[in-house]
Amino acid sequence: MTSSYPAALPLLIGIVVAAVTAFGLVGYGFPAIGRGGPGAVARGGGALAGALAAVAYAWGLIALFLDESGTAQACQDANPALYGQVSGYSVSYLPPALDCRMSSGSSYAAAVPGFLTPVMTVSAVIAVTLALIAVVEHRRTTTPQHPGKRST
């Protein structure tokens, strides 16, 4: 049986970076909404959506980290009926995933909850969309409506 176990150091670094990012975005998002002004909801909402994506990513990495020493056990727990056919494991860090590969060529997911990837993806798309809306709103409100001509 071949394996590709997740490495603890990249997982720990990813968890710390995702957690710090989430806290920073939450710390920016709520005050941005509270200050009000043009584009405040888009700026704050984008930051909060980004924080949700970071939390979902950290959750997936934590699931991989907790399983780091028991990959075979995770595959057995995920699907006991298919565990006898497992020939190896593959790990993905983006999105976080542990796949149990079977000798038939197919695979099944283990360790990381299946809803995390859609949550990360949708949250990231919302965050980028709201950030673009905030940029457009900022440009719209800071661009002079009637630029004056300069005389020299």
Image (tube, rainbow, N blue to C red):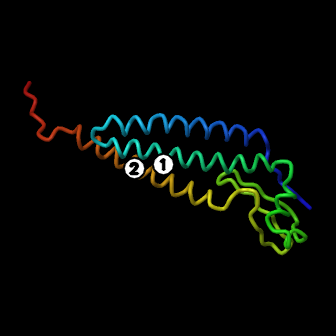
Report the residue that reaches farthest toward the bottom: 104
Binning the other alpha carbons within 10 Å of mark 1 as few (below 14), some (14 to 19) or many (20 upward) gives many
In the displayed structure, does residue 137 sit left or right of residue 28? left
- Find disc 1 in the rendering and name its residue: 49
| Label ID, residue 139 | none
Residue sitting nearer the eye, 149 or 47: 47
- Disc 1 and disc 2 in contact, CB within 8 angstroms: yes
Front-most of 137 and 25? 25
Tag 2 secondary structure? helix
Which quadrant holds the C terminus? top left
Element type where label 1 sits in the image = helix
Residue, far left: 151
Q: CA distance from mark 1 to mark 2?
A: 9 Å
Tell me the residue at 38%/36% (across/down). Answer: 32
Amino acid tagged 1: Ala
Q: Residue at x 48, y 34 (%)?
A: 27
- Residue 112: give x, y in percent of width and height: 71, 56
- Residue that label 2 marks: 130
Specify whether 91 is left or right of 44: right
For marks 1 and 2 on the same chain, the one whose residue lies earlier in the sequence: 1
- Side of 143 where 54 appears, left or right: right
The mark total stands at: 2
Residue 45 lies, with reference to residue 111, above or below; the image says: above
Residue at image point 78% right, 58% down: 90
The x, y position of residue 81, in whole percent, is 85, 73
Rendered view: 142 above or below 66: above
Amino acid of disc 2 = Leu
